[in-house]
Amino acid sequence: MALTYTLDNARSLIAVALIIFISWLLSENKKRFPFFLTIGAIAVQAGLVLLLFAIPNSQAVLSGVTAAVDGLADASDRGAQFVFGYLGGGQSPFATVPEGGQLPFIFGFRVLPLILVISGLSALLWHWNILKWITRLFGLLFEKTMGLGGASALAVAANIFMGMVESPIVIRAYLDRLSRSEIFLMMVVGLATVAGSTMVAYAVILGPVLPNAAGHVLVASIISAPAGILLARIMIPEERKATELDYEVTLKYENSMDAITRGVQDGVMVAVNVAAFIIVFVAFVGIVNNLLGLAPPLNGEPVTLQSLFGYVFAPVAYIIGIPWEEAHAGGNILGVKLFLTEFIAYIDLGNIPADAMSERTRMILTYAICGFANVASVGIMTGGMTVLMPERRSEILNLAWKALIPGFMATLMTAAIVAALPAQLFGG
C-alpha cells in the first residue's frame, strides 16, 4: 500500500501545536508545562491509531466491530418493533410508503431504544468483569504512560466506555480525596469522550454514509482520552501526589439481574436527556432561524444559525485538515456540536449525501465531534457530579465551564492527528 502525504496532512500538525499553545495560554501555572506528558500523549494517540488501523488485518477487525454494532442495532430494533410496531423499523402497513414498505429512519424509535440496550449490556459486562478488566487495562496504560494516579486513571478509562456521569460512580469512594486538578481532569476527559451507549447510536446514524463508522467512532472515543488528559494537565497542573486506588471498592452490582436493572435505569435517564435536549435545542434553532430570516441574504443564501456556524468555524475545520472547499460545511458541523449537541451534529453529518462530502472529510469530522463537549453537557455533568460530591459543589461549578474549552479542543486535536496521517491507512 503506497502512502501519500499532502499539505492537508501537514497543516493538521500545525493545529496540534496551536491547540497545545492555546491551552498553555489558559494555564493556571504557565511555568509548569508538562513536556514529557505532551510527547507521551501525542505518541499514545498516534500509536493507538496506527495499532488500530495500520497493522495487518486491522480493517478486518474494524469490520468485525461494525458487524457487532449492526448486530446490536438489529437486536435493539427487534425490541423496539415489539413495543412500537412499524415505527421501530418493521414492515409498514401503508402501501404508499416506498422502498418495500419500510418507513424512514425515525430517531426516537430507532436510536433511543438502542441506548437502553447498550446501557444494560454495559452494566452486565461490568458485573461479569469483562468491561471492568478492559477498563483496568486502559487505566494501566494511562497510569504508566501519563503518570496518572490509580483513581484518576480508572475514571479516565471508564469515561471511554461509560460516560462522564457514570465514570465518577466507578470511583465514588475516592471522590472526596481527589485534588482540584484531578476533578478538572475527570471533567475534561468526560467532555472529550462519549459513552458506549451513545457511541453505538452515532455509528448507526453514520453507517449509511461512512464505511466502518462503528470502528471510527470507537477509536475516536479511545484516542481522545489522552488528548483530554494532556490539555487538562496543561491548564491545571497537579500540585500533589495522585490519589491511589483499591480496585476492590469500585462500582459493584449484587448479581446479573441487578446489573441489568440498574443499567437499564441509567439508560432511561440518558435516553430521556438525549430526547429532551434534542427537542429543545432543535426548537431553539428554529426560533433563531426564524429571527435570522428577517436579515438580508448572505452570499445569496438565507441567513441561518447553521450558515453562521459554517463561516465562524470554517477556519477551525480548515486548520485541522479539511480542504477549504469543504471547510464551510465542516465548520457548520463543528458549531452545531459545540453549541447544540453532538447528537444533532452527527444527525446533520449523516444527512449530508455521500457524494456531497469526501470520505476523508466525513471521517475527520467524525473524530472532531466525538465528544460530549457542548453547552448542554456542561449542565448534565455538573448536575451529576454535584449529586455525588455535594460538599464540593462550588468547586465543580467553578471548573465546569473552564473544562468545556479543553474538552472541545481535545476532539479537535484527535481529528488533527488522524488527519495528519495518510488517508490510505484508513482505507481511503
Image: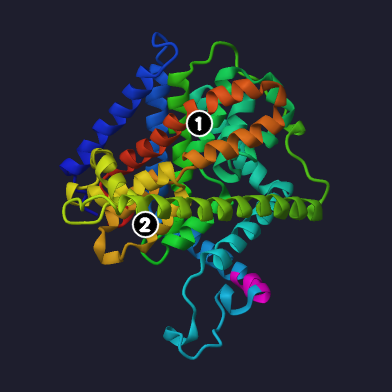
**Looking at the picture, which amino acid does disc 1 mark?**
Val
Residue 118 horizontal side relative to residue 410, left or right: right
As displayed, is residue 96 above or below residue 370? below
Q: Which residue: 57% across, 70% down?
A: 74
Quadrant in which residue 231 is drawn: top left
Cα separation, mark 1 vs mark 2, equals 24 Å
Quarter of the image with the N terminus in it: bottom left
Kindly tell me whether residue 235 is visible in this rendering: yes
**Looking at the picture, which amino acid does disc 2 mark?**
Leu
Q: Which residue: 42% across, 42% down?
A: 339
- Seen from this angle, which residue lies furthest top? 31
Residue 189 horizontal side relative to residue 12, left or right: right
Residue 309 place in picture, x, y as percent: 31, 45
Question: What secondary structure characterizes most of the magenta part?
Answer: helix
Residue 424 horizontal side relative to residue 65, left or right: left
- Report how many numbered discs are placed on residues in the image: 2
Assess disc 1: are there few (<14), some (14-19) or many (≥20) residues with their C-alpha within 10 Å of its C-alpha. many
Residue 306 place in picture, x, y as percent: 33, 51
Quarter of the image with the C terminus in it: bottom left
As displayed, is residue 91 above or below residue 146? below
Q: Which residue is mark 1?
A: 188
As displayed, is residue 261 above or below residue 27? below
For the residue labelled by badge 2, is the local secondary structure a helix, a strand or a loop? helix
Residue interval drawn in magenta: 77-83
- Seen from this angle, which residue lies furthest right? 254
Q: Is residue 82 in the magenta section?
A: yes
Q: Which residue: 60% across, 50% down?
A: 273
Say which of 383 and 69 sits in front: 383
Q: Which mark is residue 349?
A: 2
Say which of 178 and 315 sits in front: 315
